[in-house]
Image: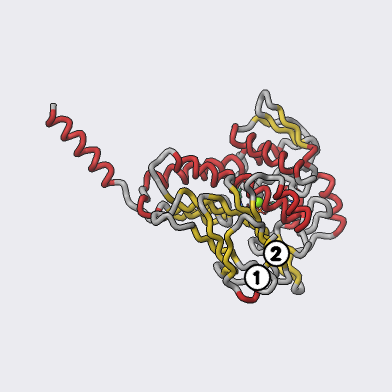
Amino acid sequence: MVFRKGIILLVFFALISCEQFEYSRSEFALGTVCTIALYEQGRSGIYNSIFKRIFEIEQLMSVNIPDSDISRINAAAGINQVQVDNDTFYVIQRALYFAEKSGGAFDPTVGPLVSLWNIGADVKRIPSEDEINNVLPLVNFRYVELDLQTNSVYLTKIGMALDLGAIAKGYAADEAAKILRQTKIKSAKIDLGGDVYMYGKKRDKSPWRIGLQNPVGDRGSIIGVLRTGECTIVTSGVYERYFEIDENRYHHIFSPFNGYPVNNGLLSVTIVSDNSMDSDALSTSVFVLGYEKGLALVKTIPGAEAVFIFDDKSLKITSGLDFILTDNSYQTAATKE
Ligand code: FAD
Ligand code: MG
């Protein structure tokens, strides 16, 4: 009996030692490079589970996958309702909640505008006013009908299209953190291309340090460092996707009110909170609303903090954040709100 137990234990440890150790792993998903770092506790099985979940969410919510829930909803716009997975239904519900809360600044029916502008494609072209005016009436979250009994979604006008690009990455980060909570992982960084989740505590118990991207600098150049405990840090900015014509920048965050890339003096908005999906929706909402209305919205969300970076190289930071400015060209205008 003791002998058999010994063999079982041996096999168990052999299996564990077969599992590869990885400090971090990156994969291309959700249209961006996703990097998970489990540091010293990194085991291939946990990375596999997390990426499996991320790819599941992409498969359900991508507009670029023809049989995703979102593509099926869009294809049936004005025709019939479409039954979707619980995950998709939940994210759409949350997107509509933020659409309401932001007075329509955040709008998941922005799909027709995203397609029209096609920011990030090889061809850069400013649509005509007629083209914009043609699609604007299709951008209205109030035309989305949800059937709670059957998990079905109906876009009531032909030509409407959902786009969850401003919220679904946040959901994926929360789901990754949920998987980590079922493990013994003590500290991890989940980075889904601008949506960052700092999980647990650093080994030496010192605060996490997260660099804030300089919105006009090279990728990776930072203007300062946030020091935090476990939290999620999500940024919406003019630098993620854009094209330039005659020195004017046309980026990927649109005003649902006029159909153009938002142009209100903000270069980026970073939200820090304990929920990545809400932060993702909030960062886009606040970016569209602009500083004053955006700050008012942030203040209605318990525990949410924000960093606003403006095109005159000033920045404003809400009082709950510990932020160290490292780029002197921004220093003089740094303010605490
Ligand atoms: P955020 O500010 O969080 O979101 C901006 C994005 O939201 C815009 O790109 C637009 O899609 C949408 N948006 C614009 N204005 C508004 C508004 N007023 N209200 C609400 N939403 C708005 N990219 C690819 O190139 N190829 C892919 O195959 C691909 N697949 C993806 C699949 C999924 C499930 C997700 C979530 C994203 C995918 N992406 C893909 C990336 C996506 O297109 C966006 O670039 C990305 O989500 C933008 O995130 P962000 O954090 O930079 O900006
Ligand atoms: Mg967002």
Question: Which image quarter: residue 236?
Answer: bottom right
- Residue 101 vs residue 22, the one in the foreground: 101
**Residues at marks 2 and 1, CA–CA distance in whole angstroms:** 8 Å
Instruction: State the residue lying farthest toward the bottom.
Output: 329
Rendered location of residue 228, percent (x, y): 53, 55
Q: Residues within 10 Å of mark 1 (few under 14, many from 20)?
A: some
From this viewpoint, is residue 82 visible? yes
Which residue is nearer to you in this view: 235 or 116? 235
**Of 22 and 211, the residue lying toward us:** 211
Confirm or deny contact between disc 2 and disc 1 (CB under 8 A): yes
Quadrant occupied by the C terminus: bottom right
| Residue plotted at (42% across, 45% down) | 48
Q: Looking at the image, is mark 2 or mark 1 earlier in the sequence? A: 1
User: Image check: 66 left or right of 158?
Assistant: left
Observer-nearest residue: 213 or 327? 327
> Mark 2 = which residue?
267
Q: Amino acid at mark 1?
A: Val
From the top left corner, tell me how far across and down residue 215 is, in percent: 64, 67
In the displayed structure, would residue 255 be above or below residue 60?
below
Q: Position of residue 318 (x, y in %)?
A: 66, 57
Please give the residue where the numbered disc 1 appears in the rendered image.
Answer: 216
* Res 92 quadrant in image: top right
Is residue 227 toward the left or the right of residue 281 in the image? Answer: left
- Which residue is painted at 64% across and 34% down in the image? 89
